[in-house]
Image (spheres, rainbow, N blue to C red):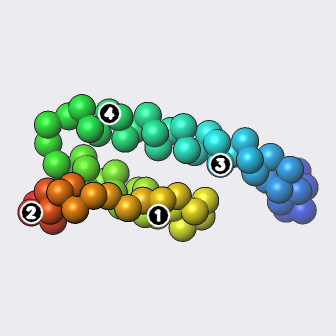
Amino acid sequence: MDIMQGIAWIQTNWSSIAQAIASVIGTASIIVRITPTLKDDHFMKRLVKFIGKFIALNNNISGVEQKKVNKK
């Protein structure tokens, strides 16, 4: 598979790729919320911001959650 075929495949399957990424993030978010530490919350926030640049996720968190994240 050359580069052009790869790009064509990504363009053709973009909705499925974005759905898979969103599913992984959703599952990880649930796991992060269950754990009591904030260390994983920081990692998840950075990951969502990074990926959000590419698939336009809404990564805003509430003010209370923002204060928790900023404390650590």
Residue that numbered label 3 is attached to: 18
Secondary structure at badge 2 equals: helix
State the mark number for residue 50: 1
Q: Nearer the viewer, mark 2 or mark 1?
A: 2
Label 3 crowd (10 A; few <14 / some 14-19 / many >=20): some
The answer to whether the residue labelled 3 contacts the one labelled 2, judged by CB atoms less than 8 Å apart, is: no
Q: Amino acid at mark 2?
A: Lys
Question: Closer to the N terminus: mark 4 or mark 3?
Answer: 3
Label 4 crowd (10 A; few <14 / some 14-19 / many >=20): few
Question: Closer to the N terminus: mark 2 or mark 4?
Answer: 4
C-alpha distance separating marks 4 and 3? 20 Å
Residue that numbered label 4 is attached to: 31
Q: Nearer the viewer, residue 58 or 54?
A: 58
Q: Quadrant of the C terminus?
A: bottom left
Residue 17 falls left or right of residue 37:
right
Residue 25 falls left or right of residue 56:
left
C-alpha distance separating marks 4 and 1? 19 Å
Q: Nearer the viewer, residue 69 or 46?
A: 69
Q: Nearer the viewer, residue 58 or 12?
A: 58
On the question of residue 37 being in view, the answer is yes
Q: Amino acid at mark 4?
A: Ile
Q: Nearer the viewer, residue 25 or 10?
A: 25
Q: Which residue is drawn at the image coordinates 24% and 32% (left, top)?
A: 34
C-alpha distance separating marks 3 and 2? 32 Å
Q: Amino acid at mark 1?
A: Phe
Q: Position of residue 54 (x, y in %)?
A: 60, 64
C-alpha distance separating marks 2 and 4? 21 Å
Secondary structure at badge 4 equals: helix
